[in-house]
Image (spheres, rainbow, N blue to C red):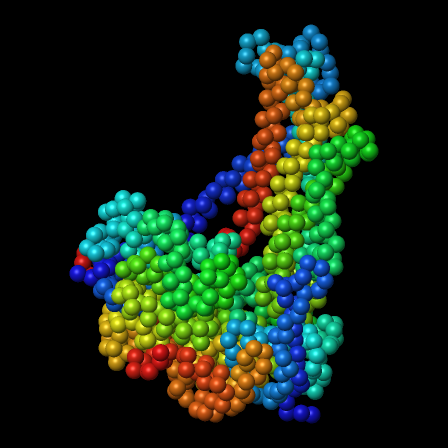
């Protein structure tokens, strides 16, 4: 049994079109799965559905989200929050808005430990210092007392990583955690996430649009288009040759600086038309309530 | 997200119709007050004092909404009072808007010393308690319609200046302003053609809000007997007079109060509705 | 006449540092560009690359004089434009144009696409506006009917095409493109880059392309300028820079790019 198992998850705008179309995927304990797709493919929506932070206009209309075999959808909101709080954490995309600008960094890390796990404040602060050292922040004592705007983007992302690992979650959802960073900083942060993930044995659901990043951090990946899974495979076999035409086109469109010709191949219109036809056909089966 | 917007979207239409409807009614009543008023609003009839509105026992059908303690017709006084309220709202609101928005636009877009001067002036201005300021002004200028309008403009232009300045600063940082410069537009041209249209919905919403506020301020000043001369009926004056006889003749107080409430609410809702209606991005 | 469209000599730009402004007195200034000297030959596609805070966008905005430099000089087609006033710049503005990073913020949300493209044309007093709009839309591969749409009705890639159409409608000699593909999906990215490449050839443009990402510009650019902390660390022809990077910082930038290949030794 996977640690996180999503089955036929369908998310819709209320009375509107589906944002996710019967998505199924699993994340094994200690494993890294990448969620890939273009903007609007619904990749962030999956993480939000798991965490129970979907936008107000959206709702889960079908499917199950199993955390260690327990269906989150059947829990009371309070029980659900407790399970999520104890087992799952988030590394957000934008390190600037994810930290409260008017509070010092330290309490923002210890909050989780004190509020959710009931730690005493001094113990939580000792743990936060330890974590900041673990994410290679020099002078952790000074950073604890700093305000977010006094830190660089890379430092803020390190703080958020420390904070995500603070409560020893078994699953971390990373939502494009390096998109806002410079390439050189991105490399350091990815290295750090991988190092922490391996040391703590945490499962990771890594949302990204960058296939280069996927090849470095993940063991398996799910490719999404318009909220539907078009490919679900191991990273090695994906980069050896994707099986779906859309995945192939996406890989071909990803720039490689080592190629002197600079492969700049947009996804061909014929492939877009084909995958759109597939989705339309899938919607028909969904409406009839049949199994695809 | 589109769907969520779709739900809210039906609302501004209804809101625009309801508030616009009341305001239209008010304008018509104000314009035709001399024609439709059943009585002279100033005519006293001490033998017909404190007559209740038409549905109560002892009412005189000639006085639909009853009479006050001096026997003056409440409906007629309300119609004439609405006339004054509307004049104050339109003239004071528009003047306040013109002065405040212009200064705000200059401060927010041109920045530099102009911003420094205008912002300091606004800060100092807003440190005065507004009602005392108004009373002081009226004391100097003397009572009358003109004084009330001047008092409102002098007190309230800062509201526009502050909001428009912030909005213009935000818009000024957008790249389309840089791109207007790349295209060779002058600073003044950019302010007028690029910034103003984007600030306009906010100005319109603020303008209608200000009209509502002007009505309230006029009522407050009338209430403390500092507005227009006492022989002209105003809603605020009626409320002040009705207060003393609230237990014997509630209608003298309640009808103008209700009209005041509806008018102020309609102005603010009308503005919000217009803002949403004319914003291509929200639409 | 010269074959250089731009000649820069010891260009310095600084901004006041408001976060360190003392209670009284002027804020200290941060030097964003620390004396840049380089030329842009006609017909070249110059990539300007660097991390955040490298000064690449400031350099771009100084080139088209949205920013006034502190010292040094910028010559455009032999004319010194370093200190020109807005009025004397206006006739020149038609000849250097800019495409912005975020098309959502650079396209006035209250204007239709046709009006957005027409704006600069009217300001420069050109005639046949309608046909020039159509021509520009044709060149960027958008249907002519798009002239009647608002920016928010378009996709990200389409909006960026409108930004390009607005810039080329004036038939400028030089275009500055500031991070114009960084907000786009890989597929739209490839489309926009291909479009720029063909426009450069077709219209004989000189182009400066600012990017934080070396991987997208190998095909497009003929020469690459690497900036770090406001100074040029490398200025080389594209093949040279990729095959044999001279500066440590360039090598670091290249090494940090994750190739879509699980066999690349990266960490």
Above or below, C264 relative to B9: below
- Which residue shows up at 65% across the image and 37% down it? B213
- Label total for image: 0
- Which residue shows up at 76% across the image and 23% down it? B230
Q: Is residue A22 visible?
A: no
- Which residue shows up at 33% across the image and 82% down it? C265
- Which residue shows up at 35% across the image and 63% down it? A174
Where does residue B104 sit, x and y in percent of width and height? 69, 52
Work out whether residue A248 or residue A205 is closer to the camera in this orientation and state it: A205
Q: Is residue A76 visible?
A: yes
Where does residue A47 sit, x and y in percent of width and height? 33, 59
Work out whether residue C134 or residue B121 is closer to the camera in this orientation and state it: B121
Above or below, A124 relative to B183: above
Q: In which quarter of the image is residue C60?
A: bottom right
Work out whether residue B194 or residue A280 is closer to the camera in this orientation and state it: B194
Work out whether residue A135 or residue A292 is closer to the camera in this orientation and state it: A135
Where does residue A161 sit, x and y in percent of width and height? 38, 63
Q: Quadrant of residue B88?
A: top right
Q: In this view, does B281 lie to the left or right of B27?
A: left
Above or below, B201 relative to C87: above
């Amino acid at each position: 049994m996977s640690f996180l198992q999503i089955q036929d998850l369908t998310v819709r705008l209320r009375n509107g079109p589906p944002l996710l179309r019967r998505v199924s995927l699993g994340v094994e304990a200690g494993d890294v799965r990448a969620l890939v797709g273009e903007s609007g493919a619904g990749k962030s929506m999956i993480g939000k559905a798991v965490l129970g932070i979907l936008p107000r206009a959206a709702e889960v209309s079908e499917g199950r989200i199993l955390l260690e075999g327990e269906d989150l959808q059947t829990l009371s909101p309070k029980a659900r929050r407790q399970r999520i709080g104890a087992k799952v954490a988030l590394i957000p995309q934008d390190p600037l808005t994810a930290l409260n600008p008017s509070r010092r960094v330290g309490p923002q890390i210890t909050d989780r430990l004190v509020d959710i796990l009931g730690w005493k404040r001094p113990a939580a602060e000792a743990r936060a210092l330890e974590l900041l050292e673990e994410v290679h922040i020099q002078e952790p004592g000074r950073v604890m007392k700093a305000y977010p705007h006094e830190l660089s983007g890379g430092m803020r992302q390190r703080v958020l990583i420390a904070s995500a690992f603070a409560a020893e979650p078994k699953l971390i959802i990373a939502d494009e955690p390096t998109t806002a960073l410079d390439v050189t900083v991105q490399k350091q942060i990815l290295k750090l996430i991988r190092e922490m993930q391996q040391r703590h044995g945490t499962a990771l659901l890594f949302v990204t649009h960058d296939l280069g990043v996927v090849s470095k951090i993940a063991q398996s990946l799910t490719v999404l288009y318009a909220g539907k899974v078009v490919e679900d495979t191991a990273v090695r076999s994906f980069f050896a040759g994707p099986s779906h035409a859309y995945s192939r086109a996406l890989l071909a469109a990803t720039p490689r600086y080592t190629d002197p010709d600079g492969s700049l191949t947009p996804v061909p219109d014929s492939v877009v038309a084909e995958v759109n036809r597939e989705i339309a056909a899938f919607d028909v089966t969904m409406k009839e309530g049949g199994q695809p | 997200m589109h769907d969520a917007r779709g739900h809210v979207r039906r609302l501004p239409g209804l809101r625009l119709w309801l508030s616009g409807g009341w305001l239209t009614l008010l304008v018509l009543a104000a314009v035709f007050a001399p024609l439709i008023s059943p009585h002279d609003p100033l005519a006293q009839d001490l033998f017909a004092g404190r007559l209740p509105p038409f549905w109560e026992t002892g009412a005189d059908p000639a006085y639909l909404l009853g009479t006050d303690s001096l026997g003056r017709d409440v409906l007629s006084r309300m119609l004439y009072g609405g006339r004054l309220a509307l004049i104050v709202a339109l003239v004071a609101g528009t003047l306040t808007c013109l002065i405040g928005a212009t200064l705000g636009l200059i401060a927010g877009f041109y920045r530099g010393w102009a911003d420094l001067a205008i912002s300091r002036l606004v800060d100092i201005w807003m440190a005065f308690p507004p009602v005392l300021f108004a009373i002081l002004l009226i004391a100097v200028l003397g009572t009358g319609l003109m004084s009330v309008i001047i008092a409102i403009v002098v007190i309230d232009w800062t509201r526009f200046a502050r909001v428009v300045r912030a909005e213009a600063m935000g818009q000024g940082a957008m790249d389309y302003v840089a791109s207007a410069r790349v295209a060779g537009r002058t600073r003044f041209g950019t302010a007028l053609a690029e910034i103003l249209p984007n600030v306009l919905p906010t100005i319109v919403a603020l303008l209608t809000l200000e009209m509502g506020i002007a009505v309230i301020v006029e009522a407050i000043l009338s209430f403390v007997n500092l507005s227009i001369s006492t022989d002209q009926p105003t809603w605020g004056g009626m409320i002040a007079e009705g207060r003393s006889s609230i237990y014997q003749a509630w209608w003298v107080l309640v009808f103008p109060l209700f009209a005041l409430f509806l008018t102020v609410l309609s102005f603010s809702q009308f503005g919000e509705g217009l803002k949403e209606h004319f914003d291509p991005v929200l639409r | 006449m010269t074959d250089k469209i731009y000649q820069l000599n010891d260009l310095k730009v600084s901004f006041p540092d408001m976060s360190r402004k003392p209670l009284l007195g002027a804020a200290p200034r941060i030097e964003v560009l620390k004396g840049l000297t380089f030329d842009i030959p006609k017909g070249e596609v110059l990539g300007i690359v660097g991390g955040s805070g490298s000064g690449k966008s400031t350099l771009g905005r100084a080139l088209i004089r949205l920013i006034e430099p502190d010292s040094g000089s910028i010559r455009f087609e032999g004319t010194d434009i370093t200190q020109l006033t807005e009025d004397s710049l206006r006739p020149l503005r038609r000849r250097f144009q800019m495409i912005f990073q975020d098309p959502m913020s650079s396209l006035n949300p209250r204007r239709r696409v046709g009006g957005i493209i027409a704006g600069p044309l009217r300001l420069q007093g050109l005639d046949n506006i309608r046909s020039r709009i159509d021509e520009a839309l044709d060149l960027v591969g958008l249907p002519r009917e798009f002239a009647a749409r608002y920016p928010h009705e378009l996709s990200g890639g389409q909006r960026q095409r409108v930004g390009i159409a607005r810039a080329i409608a004036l038939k400028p000699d030089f275009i500055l493109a500031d991070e114009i593909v960084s907000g786009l999906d890989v597929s739209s990215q490839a489309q926009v880059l291909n479009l720029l490449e063909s426009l450069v050839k077709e219209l004989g443009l000189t182009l400066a392309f600012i990017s934080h990402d070396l991987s997208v510009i190998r095909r497009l650019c003929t020469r690459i300028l690497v900036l770090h902390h406001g100074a040029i660390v490398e200025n080389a022809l594209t093949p040279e820079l990729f095959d044999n990077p001279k500066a440590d910082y360039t090598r670091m930038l290249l090494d940090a790019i994750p190739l879509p290949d699980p066999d690349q030794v990266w960490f």
